[in-house]
Amino acid sequence: MTIPSPGYSITVRVEVPASADATAALTTAVSSTGGALTALDVAESHTDRLVVDVTCDTRDEAHGQAITEAIAAVPGAVVRKVSDQTFLLHLGGKIEVNPKVPLKHRDDLSRAYTPGVARVCLAIAEHPEDARRLTIKRNTVAVVTDGSAVLGLGNIGPLAALPVMEGKAALFKQFGGVDAWPVCLDTQDSDAIVEIVRAIAPVYGGINLEDISAPRCFEIEARLRELLDIPVFHDDQHGTAIVVLAALRNALRVVGKSIDDVRIVVSGVGAAGHAIIRLLLTQGARDIVACGRNGAVHSGEQVMEPFRQWIADHTNPRHQSGTLKEVLVGTDVFIGVSAPDLLTGADIATMAPGAIVFALANPVPEVDPLAAGEHAAVVATGRSDHPNQINNVLVFPGFFRGLLDAHVSGITDAMMVAAAHAIADTVQPGELNPSFIIPSVFEASVAPAVADAVRRAAKR
């Protein structure tokens, strides 16, 4: 069973009699239904009644409704209003544009806009390379999606994808000082996406592709990298691969194993799975089996698209076939970037001693983390309410900070490996243990360390 989460936090405004046990009854109502009470505030006080705001974390919308009904059942209680804290946070959007220069009088306007701005325009026309120095291009990234593969929600389209892209832009600014902007495209035609991004690229110093379905995402990224002189980064692929490598590097230290000796199973052969496998192979992994919906990917399969064929050609050295559960037996590492509830604790028990489990499907992982923890030495998820959260926010703000500072036009494996090592090394040897293999997303030293590693790799 999932536990209450701030992502489903509600505030119930309720009127109750002004008795000595009124607030205690509300607290009991929340706890009796499994809610996590986070605040209880008196909004109004009268001689005969109180108006109380009861804020609590819930498991999901249905659980929130059950808690509200329990509060309403308190004798004398009248529920006035229920507010969803997540929806309140999104009202009006999460980002805005602010000027960086003063615009207080006529002289300011003459320099920032006409007539003074014309001189800057002509200078850039004569020397286009100066655009990076004289405009927002030096610090601006486009977060581009077509809404075809948003989180675990699927093909929900560009409008529904916008809240995610806004959040991404906010994280770019908060953790990397990068100005990012959502670009949600109302087309899922690969040719159209490539042409639109090519046409808008002059504004930006980098392109972050996000939530575009596989295998189209591979083609779109490859074509844009050929066309553009700015870095193009598909975060679902490379951001995930970088943070997984960082976490695995430390997890292997905890269990005393080496990447070139362990047997690894990757569940999911889409964008993230493909990129993870690629990066692990560059670091010496020799025994990886990838599993799709029909089980282990192997070279004997017929009619595979090119990226799945690449996986078949470069993995499964023992030519295994069978289901995910079958090929998991005896392995050292499970990395899931696929679908919820594919495995049980009993399946994890069939892995080798000292097993590592990264169950990264979000919001519901491939295996219940508590059940996995009964058998595995190290367990990680993509969730914030369990130890070892493997999250791309550890990567992209600092990674783009480094790319923009280095003025590079492309991205290399060396940069990605350097970023992974920088993240892993943020956890000091004295801090490393099975419940702490990866730094918190709020660890302030991560983004600067990643940016510095990328800059140094770019110089090499």
Image (tube, helix red, strand yellow):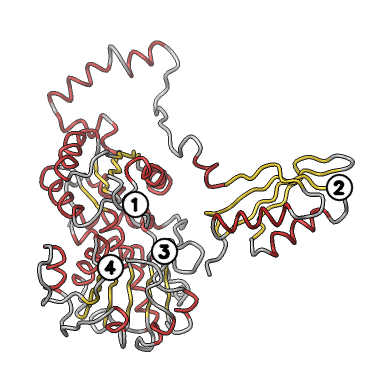
Indicate the secondary structure of the residue bearing disc 1: loop
State which tag comes first along the sequence, 2 or 1. Answer: 2
Left or right of 430 in this view: 405: left
State which tag comes first along the sequence, 1 or 3. Answer: 1
Q: Nearer the viewer, mark 2 or mark 3?
A: 2
- Quickly name the residue at label 1: 150
**Amino acid, disc 1:** Val
**Amino acid, disc 3:** Gly
Query: Which image quadrant is residue 405 in?
Result: top left
Give the x, y percent position of residue 164: 39, 47
Q: Are marks 1 and 3 in contact (CB under 8 Å)?
A: no
Q: Nearer the viewer, mark 3 or mark 4?
A: 4
Foreground of the two, 91 or 172: 91
Q: CA distance from mark 3 to mark 4?
A: 15 Å
Residue most toward the right? Answer: 47
State which tag comes first along the sequence, 1 or 4. Answer: 1
Circle 2 Cα neighbour tier, 10 Å, few/some/many (<14 / 14–19 / ≥20): some
From this view, report whether residue 92 is shown above or below residue 368. Answer: above
Give the x, y percent position of residue 86: 53, 47
- Quickly name the residue at label 2: 18
Q: Which mark is residue 268?
A: 4
